[in-house]
């Protein structure tokens, strides 16, 4: 099978959408601190089936359910470090099994969420952890190594909110030497910490193993800003939230959702791999697939 990097150079690739969103639609309560990672331990068949839902919609890449998995996070939730290590391995295996049930090239991107995600307090949208780059490197290292050993096609370092965590991940990826993308969570052309995203992308681009740069868990209208901040250093990956806004008082989502036409504008802006994050469903991924087919109809 061709590598993800080779495919990215050849055409626009379609990622999956909101894994947890789809799991909730399939009837699962993900309100505990382990979020979708809990199903890796309690209902792995549902994780596999959720990946298959996105592949059936046209996605070419499965992002694993490992975003929330870490030894410290599992221990805080009353589970063991050994269970965390098994969950990381299982996340890759389940995504691979789903991929193998579909024809055509399918890739498994092992999700590496930010340190703040495991705190389950919204810290990933602030990036103010109080940890040094060295401490972040040490925390990320074991999970990165396990995901690589598990056989993922590449690492998806995603929802990264700060320069410090970008620097930590870039250093670890340089040591590992395996293909990866680094995707910030941004507001316009700034990190969630308020720093210039272009500075984070410049740090990441120093590592040859980082084959794509971009943003996720952000506003769908920010594609042009992200492409500009990447500045041609790498192919751009972009998978924003649906565009809806959470109303905490009413406990409901409001506003518009991503549609296929949005994906067309992202590709026109220079995005090379696109999909969705929170609240983006298989139906919306199917709309993006249709948009890409209409943009480049077969001969």
Image: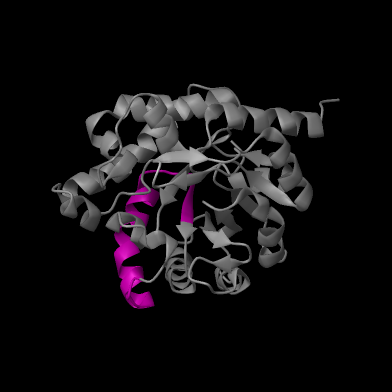
Q: Quadrant of the C terminus?
A: top right
Q: Residue at x 46, y 45 (%)?
A: 246
**Residue 34, percent across and down?**
27, 45
Q: Nearer the viewer, residue 165 or 27?
A: 27
Residue numbers of the magenta segment: 129-158
Residue pushed farthest front? 249
Query: Is 33 situated left or right of 196 in this image?
Result: left
Quarter of the image where one finds residue 285: top right
Is the residue 212 above or below the residue 196 in the image?
above
Residue pushed farthest right? 299
Is the residue 232 above or below the residue 53 in the image?
below
Quarter of the image where one finds residue 44: top left
Is the residue 126 above or below the residue 267 in the image?
below
Is the residue 140 above or below the residue 153 in the image?
below
- Check the image and tell me how it is coloured: one colour
Q: Nearer the viewer, residue 6 or 193?
A: 193
**Residue 294, percent across and down?**
79, 29
**Residue 147, percent across and down?**
37, 49
Indicate yes or no whether the magenta region holds residue 246: no
Q: Residue at x 55, y 68 (%)?
A: 204
Q: Residue at x 45, y 71 (%)?
A: 171
Indicate yes or no whether the magenta region holds residue 139: yes
Q: Residue at x 63, y 71 (%)?
A: 198
User: Does the rendering let one see residue 233?
Assistant: no
* Mark count: 0
**Residue 42, percent across and down?**
22, 31
Q: Quadrant of the N terminus?
A: top right
User: Does the rendering let one see residue 82?
Assistant: yes
């Amino acid at each position: 099978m061709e590598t993800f990097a080779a495919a990215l150079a050849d055409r626009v690739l379609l990622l999956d959408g909101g894994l947890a969103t789809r799991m909730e639609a399939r009837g699962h309560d993900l309100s505990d601190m382990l979020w979708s990672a809990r199903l890796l331990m309690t209902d792995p068949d549902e994780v596999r089936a959720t990946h298959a839902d996105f592949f059936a919609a046209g996605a070419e890449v499965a992002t694993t359910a490992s975003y929330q998995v870490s030894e410290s996070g599992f221990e805080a939730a009353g589970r063991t470090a050994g269970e965390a290590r098994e969950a990381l391995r299982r996340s890759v295996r389940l995504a691979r099994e789903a991929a193998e049930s579909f024809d055509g090239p399918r890739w498994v991107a092992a999700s590496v969420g930010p340190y703040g995600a495991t705190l389950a307090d919204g810290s990933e949208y602030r990036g103010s952890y109080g940890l040094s780059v060295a401490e972040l490197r040490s925390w990320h290292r074991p999970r990165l190594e396990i995901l690589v050993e598990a056989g993922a096609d590449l690492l998806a370092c995603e929802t990264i909110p700060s320069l410090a965590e970008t620097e930590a991940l870039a250093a670890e990826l340089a040591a590992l030497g395996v293909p990866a993308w680094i995707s910030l969570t941004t507001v316009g052309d700034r990190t969630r910490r308020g720093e210039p995203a272009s500075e984070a992308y410049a740090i990441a681009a120093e590592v040859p193993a980082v084959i794509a740069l971009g943003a996720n868990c952000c506003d769908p209208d920010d594609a042009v800003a992200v492409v500009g901040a990447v500045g041609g250093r790498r192919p751009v990956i972009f998978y924003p939230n649906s565009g809806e806004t959470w109303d905490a008082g009413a406990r409901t989502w409001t506003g518009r959702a991503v549609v296929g036409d949005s994906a067309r504008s992202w590709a026109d802006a220079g995005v090379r791999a696109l999909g969705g994050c929170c609240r983006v469903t298989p139906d919306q991924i199917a709309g993006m697939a249709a948009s890409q087919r209409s943009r480049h109809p077969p001969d």
